[in-house]
Amino acid sequence: MKTKDTGSDAKFASKTTTEKSPALKELFKDGIADLYWAENHLVKSLPKMISAATAPELKDAITAHLEETKGHVKRLEDVFGLLGEKAIAKKCDAMEGLTKEAEGIVEETEPGTATRDVGIILASQKVEHYEIASYGGLYQLAITLGLTDVAEILEQTLSEEKMADTKLTDIAGNEINYKAAEEA
């Protein structure tokens, strides 16, 4: 299928086949590869946030989520297996941008301050919201494509991402935001 604006082939063009919605399945697999890169990237990036954080409850929350994230990588490898595909990462520009933003916040805030911790929480929640949107959308696509086993795996990770976001909100609202408001 040609597009009129660019003349290039559409990446996920529908093809005539007996397989149910091949273009949609290709889009789904592309999304899984994107998340696989994102989760692997977080495994490398989260230790920087742990070392930059000051509040013990924030360090503990990020440390716990790092361990969960390693599990998310494994689950995505399981998804690739269920799809009969090799686990291949596709660079996720969104996650790269979010982690660069987080690193910028750390660089621009004073070490050991609640303000830095608030910045880390804000950056972390942006990451969580991206993951929630991605896992939620891919979960729905898995259901649509009849990939029940895959959907169950994605739903488990989606639930953990939502809990991580809630935990960050609680940490911010319980004390850190108030400490930051009192800093000069």
Image (cartoon, helix red, strand yellow):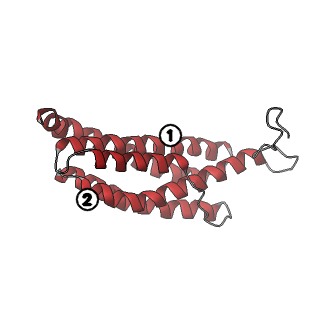
The residue closer to the viewer here, 88 or 22, is 88
Structural crowding at the residue carrying mark 1, measured as other residues with C-alpha within 10 Å and reported as few (<14), some (14–19) or many (≥20): few
Element carrying mark 1: helix
Relative vertical location of residue 86 with respect to residue 6 in this rendering, above or below = below
Element carrying mark 2: helix
Q: Could one spot residue 64 in this view of the protein?
A: no
Relative vertical location of residue 73 with respect to residue 157 in this rendering, above or below = below
State yes or no: discs 1 and 2 in contact (Cβ < 8 Å).
no
Q: Could one spot residue 105 in this view of the protein?
A: yes
What is the C-alpha distance between the residues marked 1 and 2? 27 Å
Q: Residue at x 46, y 51 (%)?
A: 157
Type of the residue with mark 1: Ala
| 171 lies left or right of 165 | left
Type of the residue with mark 2: Ser
How many circles with numbers are drawn on the protein? 2
Identity of the residue furthest to the front in this view? 108
Q: Residue 30 location, x and y as percent?
A: 65, 52
The mark found on residue 133 in the picture is: 1
Residue pointed to by mark 2: 51
Structural crowding at the residue carrying mark 2, measured as other residues with C-alpha within 10 Å and reported as few (<14), some (14–19) or many (≥20): few
Q: Quadrant of the N terminus?
A: top right
Q: Residue at x 71, y 50 (%)?
A: 26
Q: Quadrant of the C terminus?
A: top left
Give the mark, 1 or 2, whose residue is nearer the N terminus: 2
Q: Residue 47 location, x and y as percent?
A: 32, 61
Identity of the residue furthest to the right in this view? 16
Q: Residue at x 57, y 41 (%)?
A: 137
The mark found on residue 163 in the picture is: none
| 178 lies left or right of 158 | left
